[in-house]
Image (cartoon, rainbow, N blue to C red):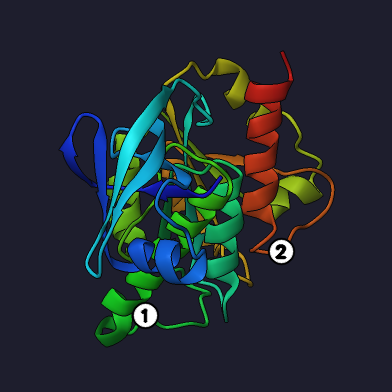
Amino acid sequence: MQRYFVNQRTNEDQFLISGDDRHHIVKVMRMQMGDQIICVDPDGKQAVCRLAEITDERVVADVVQWKEENSEPPIKITIASGLPKGDKLEWIIQKGTELGAHKFIPFSAARSVVKWDEKKAAKKIERWQKIAKEAAEQSHRNRIPEVSDQMSFKELLIHSKNYDYRLVAFEDESRNGEVSVFSSILRKMQKGESLLIVFGPEGGLASEEVQLLKDHDFHPCGLGPRILRTETAPLYALAAVSYHFELLR
């Protein structure tokens, strides 16, 4: 059953769908009156709905049954990625959303080859947020992860104070055989707490950046014995979190 995140309601038991989602329902899925979809409101509540009205401007969907299911991870994980080349960040956002990320923060790292273009920033963020929305619908999430505006490294350090726990994935820790920091942090965390994990770009984080992160209460950690690419490491971390909190019971 198709899933849509819907912000507009006429009342407790009726959703109004417009814009791209209306186009998807009518033109792509070719749905008709009486067909059913799942609508998710801004609070993450979801309901099976029946299409009651289709016009050129909107689709009206009546609630058939509210559902109690919740597919969100018990902790809030934010992925901070040093700006990588090409479409790697799109991949991280799409797959990271499927794996349960709560938020994504792109930041400018010392070794980022890509330079942030302020003139194109709004369009990029809009595209990344759309990717997150579509991935959240596909993977039956209750919420759409936020994609924040690009931050400088200094801004990231300031922002990090908003989190309960802070980690930085550092390849030197993996080379040195460190295996305990990541798992020990996960064992400490309680439901509802937040975790920020920082990942470097293709060339990794500079030693000065790692030291500054340590000075701001980040714990360097390895992610196993192998060195992972910048687009692979966040997905590994998210999968490990999912296994720890959702499967290892």
| Circle number at residue 105 | none
Under circle 1, the secondary element is loop
Q: Quick one: 150 or 109, which is closer to the camera?
A: 150
Mark 2 neighbour density, 10 Å: few (under 14) some (14–19) many (20 or more): some
Mark 1 neighbour density, 10 Å: few (under 14) some (14–19) many (20 or more): some
Place of residue 200 in the rendered image (x, y in percent of width and height, measured from the top left): 56, 62
> Outermost residue toward the left?
10
Residue kind at label 1, given as amino acid type: Trp
> Outermost residue toward the right?
225
- Whether residue 45 is visible: no
> Outermost residue toward the top?
249
Q: Quick one: 174 or 27, which is closer to the camera?
A: 27
Q: Which residue corresponds to mark 2?
A: 229
Under circle 2, the secondary element is loop
At 62% from the left and 42% from the top, the residue drawn is 238
At 71% from the left and 53% from the top, the residue drawn is 172
Q: Quick one: 60 or 86, which is closer to the camera?
A: 60
Place of residue 180 in the rendered image (x, y in percent of width and height, measured from the top left): 72, 28
Place of residue 138 in the rendered image (x, y in percent of width and height, measured from the top left): 56, 51
Dividing the picture into quadrants, the one containing residue 32 is bottom left
Query: Image height check: is 190 above or below 87?
Result: above
At 33% from the left and 58% from the top, the residue drawn is 148
Point out the image quarter for the N terminus: top right
At 37% from the left and 69% from the top, the residue drawn is 23
Residue kind at label 2, given as amino acid type: Arg
In the shown orientation, is residue 95 left or right of residue 141? right
In the shown orientation, is residue 175 left or right of residue 56? right
Place of residue 169 in the rendered image (x, y in percent of width and height, measured from the top left): 61, 48
- Whether residue 225 is visible: yes
Q: Who comes first in sequence, dot 1 or dot 2?
A: 1
Q: Which residue corresponds to mark 1?
A: 116
